[in-house]
Amino acid sequence: MVLFNKQFLLNIVAPALLLCWAATIIYSAVAGDRGYQALSRLEAEVELKAAEVDALRERRMSLQRRANQLNSKSLDPDLIDEQIRSVLGYTRDGDIVIPRRVLDNALSQPKSE
């Protein structure tokens, strides 16, 4: 008696193997390393990285504009000195310092005649 006859192989085993093979291919296409779900994750990552690139590009442009303003040919030494003093709070001997608050109050008062 033959355990597996030709008819059994063609009618039962071959379609079962073909079905398993097709199921494996479909699973790989959907959930595999290179499947549809992986594609969705990669597209989301691409969107995140594109947003990062845009933010970095904007930051770079901001820094470039600031660097262009610091060009030594266009700088006024008095303006630089004034900016440094105001930021750092430095004064020279003989400088008269008027606090911003006092100056703003004096400018907002109506002139008395």
Image (cartoon, rainbow, N blue to C red):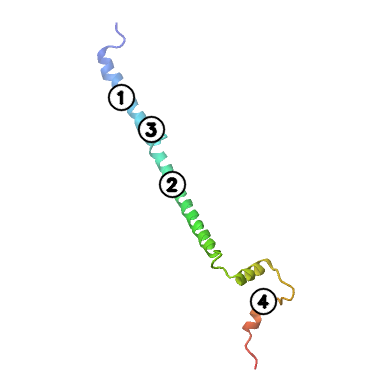
Residue 28: numbered disc: 3
Q: What amino acid does circle 4 point to?
A: Arg
The quadrant in which the C terminus is found is bottom right
| Circle nearer the N terminus (4, 2) | 2
Q: Secondary structure at mark 3?
A: helix
Work out how far the residue at label 4 is from the one at label 2, CA to CA, in angstroms: 50 Å
Is there a contact, CB below 8 Å, between mark 4 and mark 2? Answer: no
Horizontal and vertical percent position of residue 24: 36, 29
| Circle nearer the N terminus (2, 3) | 3
Q: Secondary structure at mark 4?
A: helix
Q: What amino acid does circle 2 point to?
A: Val
Q: What amino acid does circle 1 point to?
A: Leu
The quadrant in which the N terminus is found is top left
Horizontal and vertical percent position of residue 100: 66, 75
Is there a contact, CB below 8 Å, between mark 1 and mark 2? Answer: no
| Circle nearer the N terminus (3, 4) | 3
Q: Which residue is mark 2?
A: 46
At horizontal 32% and vertical 28% (from top left) the residue drawn is: 22
- Nearer to me, 62 or 54: 62
Residue 27 position by quadrant: top left
At horizontal 64% and vertical 71% (from top left) the residue drawn is: 82
Work out how far the residue at label 3 is from the one at label 4, CA to CA, in angstroms: 70 Å
Residue 101: numbered disc: 4
Work out how far the residue at label 3 is from the one at label 1, CA to CA, in angstroms: 15 Å
Horizontal and vertical percent position of residue 62: 51, 60
| Circle nearer the N terminus (1, 2) | 1
Mark in the foreground, 3 or 1: 3
In the image: residue 58, left or right of residue 89: left
Q: Which residue is mark 1?
A: 18
